[in-house]
Image (cartoon, coloured by chain):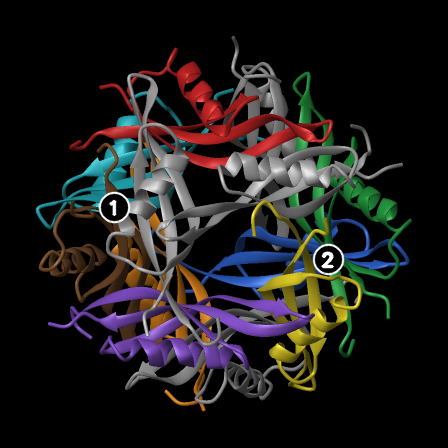
Chain colours: A yellow, C purple, D blue, E orange, F green, H cyan, I brown, K red
Amino acid sequence: MMDHVYKTIELTGTATTTPEKAVRNAIERASKTIQNMRWFQVAEVRGAIEDGKVAHWQVTLKVGFTVNE
Amino acid sequence: MMDHVYKTIELTGTATTTPEKAVRNAIERASKTIQNMRWFQVAEVRGAIEDGKVAHWQVTLKVGFTVNE
Amino acid sequence: MMDHVYKTIELTGTATTTPEKAVRNAIERASKTIQNMRWFQVAEVRGAIEDGKVAHWQVTLKVGFTVNE
Amino acid sequence: MMDHVYKTIELTGTATTTPEKAVRNAIERASKTIQNMRWFQVAEVRGAIEDGKVAHWQVTLKVGFTVNE
Amino acid sequence: MMDHVYKTIELTGTATTTPEKAVRNAIERASKTIQNMRWFQVAEVRGAIEDGKVAHWQVTLKVGFTVNE
Amino acid sequence: MMDHVYKTIELTGTATTTPEKAVRNAIERASKTIQNMRWFQVAEVRGAIEDGKVAHWQVTLKVGFTVNE
Amino acid sequence: MMDHVYKTIELTGTATTTPEKAVRNAIERASKTIQNMRWFQVAEVRGAIEDGKVAHWQVTLKVGFTVNE
Amino acid sequence: MMDHVYKTIELTGTATTTPEKAVRNAIERASKTIQNMRWFQVAEVRGAIEDGKVAHWQVTLKVGFTVNE
Amino acid sequence: MMDHVYKTIELTGTATTTPEKAVRNAIERASKTIQNMRWFQVAEVRGAIEDGKVAHWQVTLKVGFTVNE
Amino acid sequence: MMDHVYKTIELTGTATTTPEKAVRNAIERASKTIQNMRWFQVAEVRGAIEDGKVAHWQVTLKVGFTVNE
Amino acid sequence: MMDHVYKTIELTGTATTTPEKAVRNAIERASKTIQNMRWFQVAEVRGAIEDGKVAHWQVTLKVGFTVNE
Amino acid sequence: MMDHVYKTIELTGTATTTPEKAVRNAIERASKTIQNMRWFQVAEVRGAIEDGKVAHWQVTLKVGFTVNE
C-alpha cells in the first residue's frame, strides 16, 4: 500500500428488503464501471414509507478505490 | 410536492431480532395515529446487553409526514 | 442505578454475512474478559470490497459496562 | 422570560421560488395550529431538480414556541 | 423493554438560579401532560445576560417517553 | 424508485447577486453533462468580500443523480 | 498570499427582509472598523417569529480579514 | 432588534467550586470591558484533576454582544 | 510536559443530586485504580426520569492520565 | 471568479515519510488527469502501524477544481 | 490557574513549506500584539494548488490567552 | 481479516519538534505494552505556547489493535 492514491465516491443504493441489500446493490452496480474498489463506509440510512410501512431502504455509502497507475 | 409542509418526529423502536425489525416496529406503531408518513432517517443504533449477548436493539428514527391540509 | 460508575470501550467486530453478526461477534468476544456489559452504540459501519462484492463488514461499537465495586 | 418552558418542533417548508418563501410557508402553515411561536433555526436546505433546473426548495426548520400555562 | 416504542421531544427549560433547576422545570412542566417519561439528554446550555451578569439559564433537552399501548 | 442506484457529487456555484442564483448556476452548468439529476443539498454558503461589501457568493451543493442503466 | 496571517471573527447580522440582507448588514457595519476583510462563511441562520410570521432574520457569519503588517 | 449587528467572542472561565461559578466568573470579568453583552452559549466543560479529585472547572462560552452604533 | 504520553478513557458517573456530583463520583471511583489523572472533558449529560421528576443524572466524561514510565 | 462553477472530489494519498508527502502525492497524481485544481482541504489523517511503528500515512483530501467552460 | 479567565481567537497562518510552519507563522505574528498566549488547537488545514502542486498551506488555529488582570 | 475483533484506544503523544514526532512517540510508547497495533487516526492536534512560540505539540490518536485470540 506504499504511495498509492485512492479516490472516494458517494453512492446511494436502494432495496425493498434490507439495508444490507441496498449496500450490496450499490456496490455491485458500481463494479460494472469501477475496478479496484477497496472499502466502503455507510454515511446515511434512510427510507421511504408507503401505507404506514417501509417501502424501500436508501443507504448512502462512501466507496474508495485505487486510482489506476 | 409544491408548497407542502412536512413535520418530522423522532421515534425509537426496539426489537430482539434485528435493527431492521426495530425500524419496522416504530413505523408500524406510529402508523396507528399518524397518516401520510413519507420518509425516515436512522439517527442512532443502540442496544442492551444481557449475559454477554445482545438482548435487544434500539433504533432511533426521524420520521417525516405531510401536515394535513 | 444509583451512583454506579460505568466505563465505555470501543470495539470493532467483523463478519462476512451481516453487520448484525459483526456486532454480535464483537460483544460475544468481549464477554470473555468483561463482565457486566450493559449497552452498546453503533459508531461506524464500514466494510471491505473484493472482486466488486462486499467481502466483510466492520462495525465499530461503543460498549458500556459497570465498573465492579 | 423567567421560568418559562418552550417546545421545539421540526418542520419542512417547500416553495418553487426561494428558500425564504419555503421558510415563510412552513411558519405560516404552523401558525394555524400553534400559538406563541417565538423563534426558528434553519437546519437543512435541500431541493428537487427536474429537467436540469431547481424545481422546488425544501427547507427544514426547528421552531420554538412557549408551552401554554 | 421488549418491542416498546418511544417518542423523543425537545424542550427548553429556564431558571434564574442554575442549569439543573432549568432542567427540572422543563421536566416537571412536561409531566403535567406527558406520562411515562423515561430519560433526557442535555442538548444545549445557553443563557441571557443583563447588566453584565447571568440573568437566566436556558437548557434544551431531548426527553424520551413510552408511547402508550 | 425500486433498486435504483444514485451517485452524489459536490459542486460549488458562484454568483454576484444571491446565494439562490449561485445554486441555480451550479445546477444548470452541471445539467450540460449530467442527466437525471434528482436532488441537491446545500453544504456550505461562503463568499468573498471586496471593499467592505459582498463581492460574490459561493454555495457548495451535494447533487444526486440516477446512475444510468 | 504568501505567509500572510488572517484573523476570523464571528458576527450576527439582522434584517427584516431576507437573510442575504442580514449578511450584507453585518459586513457593511463591520467595514466601518475593520479593513481588509476577505471572506465570510455562514455559520447559522435563525430568526424571530411574531404573530405567526417571520419578524426578522439573524444570520451568524465567520468573517476573515488580513492582519495588518 | 431591527437591523442590529452582534459580535460573538469565546471565553473560558475557571472556578474551583462548580461549572456555574466558572460561567459567572467569565461573564463578570468580561463585563469590565464589554458593554451590552446579551447572551451566552456553553461550548465545552472541562476540568483539571489533582490527587484524584476535581481541582477546578474550565467552562468555555460563546458570548454575544451588541456592536455599538 | 516534554514527550509524555497520555491515555484517555471514557467514564459515566451517576448521582441523584447534581451533574457535578456525578462527575466527582466518576473521578473519585476511577482514582482507586488509576494514578496520575490529569484532566477531564464532559462528553454528554443525560438522566433518568421517574414519576415525572429527575431520578438521577448520568454524566459521561473523557478522562486523561499520564502513562507511567 | 465571477459565476464560475467548481467541482470537489475526495482523494487519499499515502506516503511512508510524512503526512505532507501524502498530500503532495495525492495532488501530483491527480494533476495527471485533472486540470485547473485550485484548493484542497484535509479531511482525515490516518495511518497503518507495523511492528509497533508508523508504516505509512494516509491523508484524505477534498480537492476543488474549476469546471471547464 | 485558579479563577483565571481566558479568551480564544481564531487565526489562519500560511506558509509555502509545511503546515507546521504555517502554525508557527500565525503564533509568532500574533505574539507581537497578544501577551500570555497559552495554547492552540488546529481547526482546519487547507491549501492552494497552482500548476498541479501545493502552492501554500493555510492552517486555521484557535489560540487561547490569559485575559490580563 | 475474517471475524476478527479489534479494540480502539485513545492516546495523546507530545513532542517539541513536529506533530509527526508526537504521533510516533505515542505509538512507540504504546508498543511496549500492546501487541498487534494495526492503524491509527488523528483526532486532535493541539499545542502549548510559551514566550510567543510553539513549546510543544500534543496529538491525540485513536489506535486500533487486534484482540488476541
Subunit of label 1: I
The residue at 85%/48% (across/down) is F30
- Residue H33: x, y in percent? 33, 20
Instruction: Give the residue number, with chain letter if any, for mark 2.
Output: F8
Packing grade of label 2 (10 A; few <14, some 14-19, many >=20) is: many
Q: Amino acid at mark 1?
A: Tyr
Relative to C18, does residue F35 appear above or below in the rendering? Answer: above
Q: CA distance from mark 1 to mark 2?
A: 40 Å
Quarter of the rendering occupied by the N terminus of chain K = top left
Secondary structure category for the residue under label 2: strand
Secondary structure category for the residue under label 1: strand
The residue at 15%/59% (across/down) is I30
Label at residue I6: 1
Relative to H30, does residue D35 appear above or below in the rendering? Answer: below
Q: Is residue H6 visible?
A: no
- Residue I58: x, y in percent? 26, 64
- Residue H63: x, y in percent? 39, 35
- Residue K51: x, y in percent? 73, 27
